[in-house]
Every structure is written in C-alpha cells, then in structure tokens.
Amino acid sequence: MFDLSHLGKILITIGVLIIILGGLLLLIGKVPWIGKLPGDFVWRGKNVSFFFPLTTSILISIVLSLILWLINRR
C-alpha cells in the first residue's frame, strides 16, 4: 500500500547532512579569523553586547554560492 523505503532514504540523507553540518560547525570554531574580519561589528555596552558578522556572512555566502553553482552546473 504505502512504500516506506523512499521515506527511509530521505531520512538517512537528512541525517547525513545534519552530521556534516555539525562537523563543519565544530571545525569553524577552530578557524581563528572567522568572526574577526574587518567589517564584523561589535558593540559592547554596560550590560549588553551586540555582534553582527557582516563581512563573515558575505564571505560564507559567496563560498556557498560558488559551491552550489559548481554542483548545479552539470
């Protein structure tokens, strides 16, 4: 009636992607310049601090765009 093997493959793929994303997040913490580029704004008040990683976000966006462009180029 209902084939669950297709759903199983989708769940395995999602799980593998989550594992890869978790590994990348662990490795990003070891890169010293992530979040400390010129253009990453930090404001510290008495009781509040605000961090806006503008340059880091743009750099990550460019890299991901290039990777996805290369993947979809086929």
Image (spheres, rainbow, N blue to C red):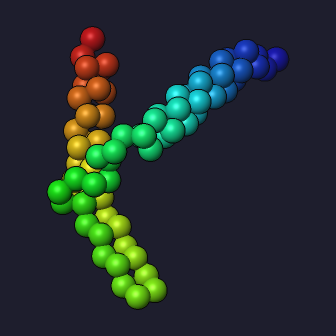
Image quadrant holding the C terminus, namely top left
Nearer to me, 41 or 15:
41
Residue 8 in the image: state x and y as whole percent. 71, 21
Residue 22 in the image: state x and y as whole percent. 55, 36
Nearer to me, 54 or 13:
54
Position of residue 48 relative to residue 65, above or below, is below
Residue 12 in the image: state x and y as whole percent. 66, 22
| Total residue callouts | 0
Nearer to me, 48 or 18:
48
Q: Residue at x 23, y 43 (%)?
A: 59
Please tell me in which quadrant of the rendered image residue 63 appears: top left
Residue 25 in the image: state x and y as whole percent. 48, 40
Q: Residue at x 30, y 76 (%)?
A: 43
Is 15 displayed left or right of 37 in the figure? Answer: right
Nearer to me, 39 or 62:
39
Q: Residue furthest top?
A: 74
Please tell me in which quadrant of the rendered image residue 39 appears: bottom left
Is 5 displayed left or right of 58 in the figure? Answer: right
Position of residue 63 relative to residue 33, above or below, is above
Image quadrant holding the N terminus, namely top right
Q: Residue at x 25, y 66 (%)?
A: 41
